[in-house]
Amino acid sequence: MGKFILALDQGTTSSRAILFERSGAIKAVAQEEFAQLFPQPGWVEHDAAEIWRSQLAVAQKVLKDHGVAAADIAAIGITNQRETTVVWDRQTGEPVAHAIVWQDRRTAGLCDALRAQGKAALIQQKTGLVVDAYFSGTKLAWLLDNVPGVRPRAERGELAFGTIDSWLIYNLCGAHVTDTSNASRTMLFNIHTLRWDEELLTLLNIPAALLPQVAASSGTVGHTRPELLGAALPIAGIAGDQQAATFGQACLSPGMAKNTYGTGCFMLMNTGKQAVASRNNLLTTVGWSFDSGLQTDYMLEGSVFMGGATIQWLRDGLGIIKTAPEVEALAMSVTDTGGVVFVPAFTGLGAPYWDAYARGAIVGMTRGTTRAHIARAALESIAYQTVDVLEAMHKDSAIAIKELRVDGGAARNDLLMQFQADMLGVPVVRPSVTETTALGAAYLAGLATGFWSSTEEISTQWRIERRFEPAMPAQQAKHHLQLWRKAVERARSLEN
């Protein structure tokens, strides 16, 4: 057996490859960013071919640069940006169009039409999802109806649809497969039967021939072509990025919750074998599955579209910082926001609002407002959105969490983590390994191949790096949240 698990972490803005040791520690990391394409307002695309090239390049680089041979790799785990939609030619492997990214809002009108037809309850009952442009189903329908020649080719069985996990696996080994966690994000998959749903396919006019086979999250689905990484390596773990992060955070028992501060923010609470239906605009989703889906854990999830992407906008849109890490020092140069509240609804609002037409707003500015106040307000907006999600989660589950485990790039920001604890009123706990998305994919692959013996072994590897205790008086925190919610109302549905 090899000494390492290779995790391929294909994210929204970069592709990464991480080598994990048996202890769960990181041996090495390679990372490469790729282009973000914005062809029209509200549209977000990726070049799927560039994603594949970047992911292969970092996988090869992490092995070469650290002198790791293919024989040292026990298995590969894959985790991916979810909902991003790719359609490609089964013979040539060429995508028929750019990938439509999860953030893309072009199908908001189609979602409006589905709700007008009274289909929202049916879709939520079967899939656990709200009707929103976020999910893959309407993106796939758009590609079929708007890219010339695609629908007849799809009906002839010439094309394949997949989320990014499927696209990578196809290129790595030729298989057309996804796992239950990614399938559950398409709006086409019945999370109770764990099968593609014929009624939903008919509703969106999607040919079943396009769809991948659905496999367990932990289990070997194929072996890489030897010429890619030096040997035929087993692909043995697959999970969407947020489910993988939850697994990597060892939130393996009902009631445990984590929040990932990535491009977006994603809070997931483990509800065990029970798929808890949300009454508060959260999502019910598959967490992970073993043994071809016979052992499945479910989650409640709240999705925030603009987390770390808000900081990227300060850098790339406003130009008030040169690198994302600079935001903490800039924000700390003032004691508060000076009354400024930032609602980063650049691509609408996610949970619990689900307002596709909301747009970003900065309110409360005066002549005394500086870039530091805006930077601090941007950080605070990430924490406020997380509070909104957790409050909805508490209403649905009747579980009051004891702590929130955190990960992702922005979780390294101490100012944000302390403010988050203050707003939530519970401790925020940051683990020693914050690359929990990749770690979760590695764990799923390692469990399938015997690299790790059990989930109990994985739980013992989780370590705290820092614990942030609430320090702000509850009344002051409540006032902050009241101002935030007033600002949200000013940002909502400006076109209506």
Image: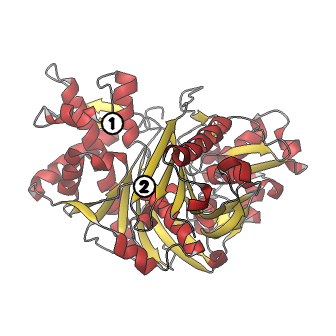
Identify the residue at image location x=36%, y=46%: 409
The quadrant the N terminus occupies is bottom right
User: Which residue extends farthest right?
Assistant: 156
Residue 126 seen in the current view: yes
- Please provide percent x and percent y for residue 226: 72, 53
- Please provide percent x and percent y for residue 310: 37, 36
Image mark for residue 381: none
- Please provide percent x and percent y for residue 405: 31, 63
Q: Residues within 10 Å of mark 2 (few under 14, many from 20)?
A: some
Q: Amino acid at mark 2?
A: Lys
Between tags 1 and 2, which lies in front? 2
Image mark for residue 27: 2
Q: Which residue is mark 1?
A: 490
Secondary structure of residue under mark 1: helix
Left or right of 93? Residue 243 is left
Residue 51 found in image quarter? top right
Identify the residue at image location x=52%, y=41%: 103
Q: Earlier in the sequence, mark 1 or mark 2?
A: 2
